[in-house]
Amino acid sequence: MINPVPTVYLVDDALSVRKGLERLIKSVGLNITTFASGEEFLRHKQYKQPSCLILDVCLPGLSGMELHTKLIQENICLPIIFITGYGNISMSVKAMKNGAVDFLQKPFNDQEIISAINKAIDKSIRIQQEADEHTKIQSMLDILTPREYEMLRWVITGMLNKQIAFELNITERTVKAHRSKIMKKMQVVSIVELVRITQKCGITPAEK
Amino acid sequence: MINPVPTVYLVDDALSVRKGLERLIKSVGLNITTFASGEEFLRHKQYKQPSCLILDVCLPGLSGMELHTKLIQENICLPIIFITGYGNISMSVKAMKNGAVDFLQKPFNDQEIISAINKAIDKSIRIQQEADEHTKIQSMLDILTPREYEMLRWVITGMLNKQIAFELNITERTVKAHRSKIMKKMQVVSIVELVRITQKCGITPAEK
DNA sequence: CTGTTTATTGAACTAAAGTACAATTTACAC
DNA sequence: GTGTAAATTGTACTTTAGTTCAATAAACAG
């Protein structure tokens, strides 16, 4: 599907908050799924994209902050907006340090939360695009043999084939053979493209 | 000088705070320069590197937040730690969104502020290193003629010389001539290095 | 007007990269 | 053992990049 409608996940134990935000968020044309606890949200497991999470700090059981930490540990990149009735500064600072998009105190006005949601959704889209690209590159890297991967790291040093051959004590012909396979497997036609995609995946050039 | 002692700048209108932090910061071997107001700090103008700024939110005249905004506008990248006696959540969130390293409430213990300072100084060092590199690359870019700069953007597309020549309706020979000058002026010997340094300065490949 | 810089191009050349035929050896799975 | 994948190498070739001699034309400064 092209440009799916963004989804807002909301975790808050107060029914009134869930109902109020549900109405507001639907009114601006977004999907919303609500949960009464962190545990309930974690059971859900299916996160649509793009999406974001509005999270009450004070929850019975798993707290909002704990849930945030858990999502970070499990590498689930879901932009988070905290909302709270009884928050304090150190809590908000901690949340922001952990990468929260915003931290709002109840009661907040519609403008504030909508603005935060838009920012969070934008972030979600960017993260997703980057993840997609990363996945695509990784799938090509995965079909490289260990030797080819090593050779890739030599190729992106910018050294001449003969220099690489000397470093590895093999012939220039062999370097060329590997290089050719690497270019095919990585689906690029120029060394420039190869450098670009390796940069994106944090592949470092080999060192003597 | 190699590895100069980091400097902590402190802006707080309370003499007791200035004295207390001065003693603490000196005790861990760092330099400290104190100011009683934002205006006084701005008059100083000479920021040593690496350094960071501890800033009281509530100041007579220019507030801490306003000073932060001013520094951002003037592109002065000084990692900031806010301290405050009477802060609120929205203030702390705003500060963190603006890139503050930390936001501490008085009274804070020595451990907290020292930890924040260390983080800020680390950030300062990283920023400085990146800025140095950026400056060095920029000085080489500056000696490129407009045409050479344009040609550079074509070269880093990864296209063949003949293709670039066709795009610009010039001969392959001319592309080679420019390319050669570009490599000399940019002080690189391989296209790989050229791609790397242009990436660092956000130079985008040309488009048809 | 004159000198300089810049952009352009040419011819001939060297060097490097890449390709199209291969073959050999090793390791490993079934 | 046999087949397969991987790593290595060879020869000969084409293509591309880069260099070394240039020269020409336009723009611009003093």
Image (cartoon, coloured by chain):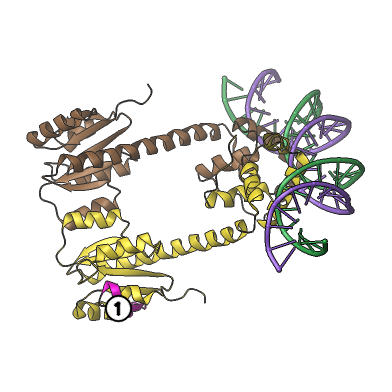
Chain colours: A brown, B yellow, C green, D purple
Which residue is more in the foreground, B134 or B193?
B134
- Residue B100: percent from left, percent from top: 30, 59
Left or right: residue A138 versus residue A102 is right
Residue D18: percent from left, percent from top: 76, 48
Residue B161: horizontal and vertical position, in percent?
Answer: 72, 39
Residue displayed at 64% across by 59% down: B143
The quadrant in which the C terminus of chain A is found is: bottom right
Pick the front one: D3 or A128: A128
Measured from the top left, where is residue B103 in percent x and y? 24, 61
A143 sits left or right of B17 in the view: right
Residue beneath disc 1? B34
Quadrant assignment, res B90:
bottom left
Chain letter of mark 1 equals: B
SS assignment at label 1: strand
In the picture, residue D8 is in which quadrant? Answer: top right
Q: In this view, does B190 lie above or below B162?
A: below
Q: In this view, does A5 lie to the left or right of B108?
A: right
Q: Is residue A163 magenta?
A: no
- Three-letter residue code for mark 1: Thr
Which residues lie in the magenta part?
A: B26-40
Q: How many marks?
A: 1
Q: In the picture shown, does residue B6 fall above or below C3?
A: below
Looking at the image, which residue is at 59% across and 40% down?
Answer: B206
